[in-house]
Image (spheres, rainbow, N blue to C red):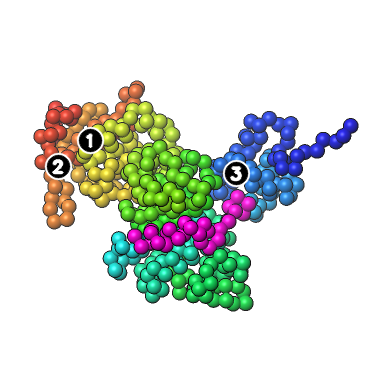
Amino acid sequence: MSAQIRPKNSFLCDRSKDSEEVNQEFEALLDYLKHNHKCDLTGYKRSTLMRRFHQRMQSIKIDSYSSYLGYLQTHGEEYLVILEYVLINVTSFFRDRDTWEYLATEIVPTIIANKQPDEQIKVWSAGCASGQEVYSLLILLAEALGIESCLQRVRCFATDADKAAIWQARQGIYSELEVASIPTELRDKYFEKTINGYVFHSKLRQKVVFAYHDLTQDAPMSKIDLLVCRNVMIYFNLNMQNSILARFHIALKDNGFLFLGKTEAVINRRQIFKPISLKHHIYTKGANLEVKDYSLINPRYREKPALEAKLQQNNICQAAYESHPFAQLIVNINGCLIAVNKQANTLFGLTLKDLYRPFAELEVAKLLDNSVAHRAFYRDRRPLTLKNMQWKVARSTKFLDILITPVLNQTKSMLGVNLTFIAASDRQQVEQEEFAGAPLLK
């Protein structure tokens, strides 16, 4: 009888176990990494992760996920090794040359034309790997602006979840093979040949802020003109891709550009990005974010599945944000701000950082007397109206009516309150709508 030989390219997991048991072992492995080493890989595609874990396990002759979990628990630095297998950095200067030509001839000139002569230009290379991408961007900008102007006006952020890659990128040293794709005149202009290799322009390199950054968890950069994230999102599942795209939407200025990889595209339940060039995978902002989008990017919100389900069941977000043109806030039963619409952002100067803060700590809370707020938020279950409350803006004062409406679930348990702020000039219109006849608090 001939011996049975396991296929060389198969996963190492014990074939006597069914797929469900294998998947459970793998999820336990990911759970261990998340809670013991703060390496959250749960948003990555499982097929990709399993393939990378398999490569590492094969190299140390481990044949099951449960055995590898034991190995992780007894070898303290192993989690760093598996991260290197997962976070494979494949990049090059001006990767996909025709796309970079389009960026140089169409997008960079547009960004510059939208700016005042001395206005700052902010660029973010998200998933910068060993630095070729961010240095390619600097070359394009220096060629368009001139090196001196680039040094004065351009600020670059280069981030990655791989600390070793960040260290390598910060050095800016590359082999002759690595710089071979750069046109000779640009290589001679922006690199210095040394005994260690080709070193990128020292002054331009100082314009780059290199930092560790996890796209799935960390807050995005802000007011970015050009955000480049190429061949990174292909490793994540669809939900995590949507979460990252929502973060990118927050990061970009209204006239900013998003530049994705050749095999990537924006797939979202709504068109929060619209294509400038599908061929070159360059986008700009489309639809505004909604509550569902914000829920994808705030971990504290995701940790409250029961509250999220109740909010969805009652469609309060739909009612609060789509039915009325007025400034609206939602405060949960714990007294924390959990949702803000665009009008409220504008009126009260709120930002994403204010979400999940205690409402009482916010400036807008001064519009409500503490005793009134306590009655409205925690005790009464009927609509209340406050008339002619004063809110000072710039050099003037606005007089607002505040409509406080309880939000109840199907069992009449209170989830929180919806606050609607209406300028006195709009009062007549509102009285004809659903809040007409609400009792008045004096």
Image location of residue 401, percent across then percent down: 15, 39
- Badge 2: residue crowd in 10 Å (few <14, some 14–19, many ≥20): some
Upstream in the sequence, badge 2 or badge 1? 1
Q: Amino acid at mark 2?
A: Ala
User: Can residue 425 be seen here?
Assistant: yes
Residue 374, given in percent of the width and then of the height, sits at 25, 37
Q: Are marks 2 and 3 in contact (CB under 8 Å)?
A: no
Residue under circle 1?
324
* Mark 2 vs mark 1: in front: 1
Tell me: residue 161, above or below residue 113. Answer: above
| Residue 365: quarter of image | top left
Name the side, left or right, on which 27 lies relative to 349.
right
| Residue 440 placement (x, y as % from top left) | 14, 32
Residue on which disc 2 sits = 423
Question: Toward which corner of the image does residue 334 lie, by quadrant?
Answer: top left
- Indicate which label's residue lies in the foreground, 2 or 3: 3
Dots 1 and 3: beta carbons under 8 Å? Answer: no
Q: Mark 2 and mark 1: span between their CA atoms?
A: 13 Å
- Which residue is pictured at 63% across the width and 39% down the height? 26
Q: Describe residue 268's horizontal placement relative to residue 31 as left or right.
A: left
Name the foreground residue: 103 vs 48.
Answer: 103
Residue range corresponding to the magenta coloring: 84-110
